Image (cartoon, grey):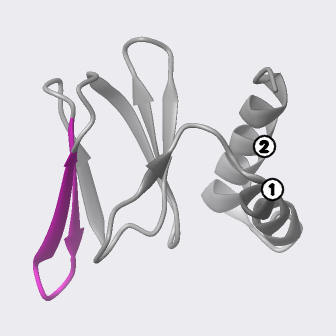
Amino acid sequence: MAVTGNLAGTVTWYELPTAATATVRTHRRVEALAVTPTTTVSGHADGTAMIWRPTLPHAAATTNLDHADRVALQTRAPEATGAERAWTDLVLALDKQRPR
């Protein structure tokens, strides 16, 4: 899978090698992307981060983790390595900072 984001706020996932795509307009400039096999995190100019899951064939976004998301990430975190671990830790840390 490959993922692109642009200043117009479009995030597109490309499934390789089939070239199937899923595209979502966020209406916020995309300034950063982080991708794991199951999750994409997009960073935006207004300081927000969006968590996208699943990426293909259906793109769905949430700006707040629900209980099931939190449990899934906490369960996966000890087994994650490298970039996936770093982003799992970041998403969980950002979630702790959000007011409930």
Picture quadrant where residue 17 is located? bottom left
Please tell me whether residue 53 is drawn above or below residue 40 in the rendered image. Answer: below
The quarter of the rendered structure image containing the N terminus is: bottom left
Query: Is 82 positioned to the left or the right of 47 in the image?
Result: right
Asked if residue 5 lies left or right of residue 41, the reply is: left
Give the foreground label among 2 and 1.
Answer: 1
In contact (CB < 8 Å): disc 2 and disc 1: no
Disc number for residue 6: none
Q: Label 1's element? A: helix
Q: Which residue is mark 1?
A: 67
Q: Residue at x 72, y 51 (%)?
A: 66
Tell me residue 74's x, y (percent). 86, 61
Q: Main secondary structure of the magenta part?
A: strand
Is 33 in front, or is 8? 8
Label 2 crowd bin: few (<14), some (14–19), many (20+), radius 10 Å: some
Q: Where does residue 21 sit, x and y in percent of width and height?
A: 15, 70
User: Element under label 2?
Assistant: helix
Give the residue type at disc 2.
Leu
Boundaries of the magenta span: 10-24
Compared to 91, does 73 lie above or below?
A: below
Q: How many numbered marks have been drawn onto this rendered protein structure? A: 2
- Name the residue located 18 percent from the left edge and 33 percent from the top edge: 6
Q: CA distance from mark 2 to mark 1?
A: 12 Å
Instruction: State yes or no: residue 13 in magenta.
Output: yes
Q: Which residue is mark 2?
A: 92
Say which residue appears at 48% left-offset and 38% top-offset.
50
* Amino acid type of the residue that numbered disc 1 sits on in the rendered structure: His
Identify the residue shown where x is 45% and y is 69%.
54
Q: Is residue 97 magenta?
A: no
Where residue 31 sits in the image (x, y, percent)? 33, 25
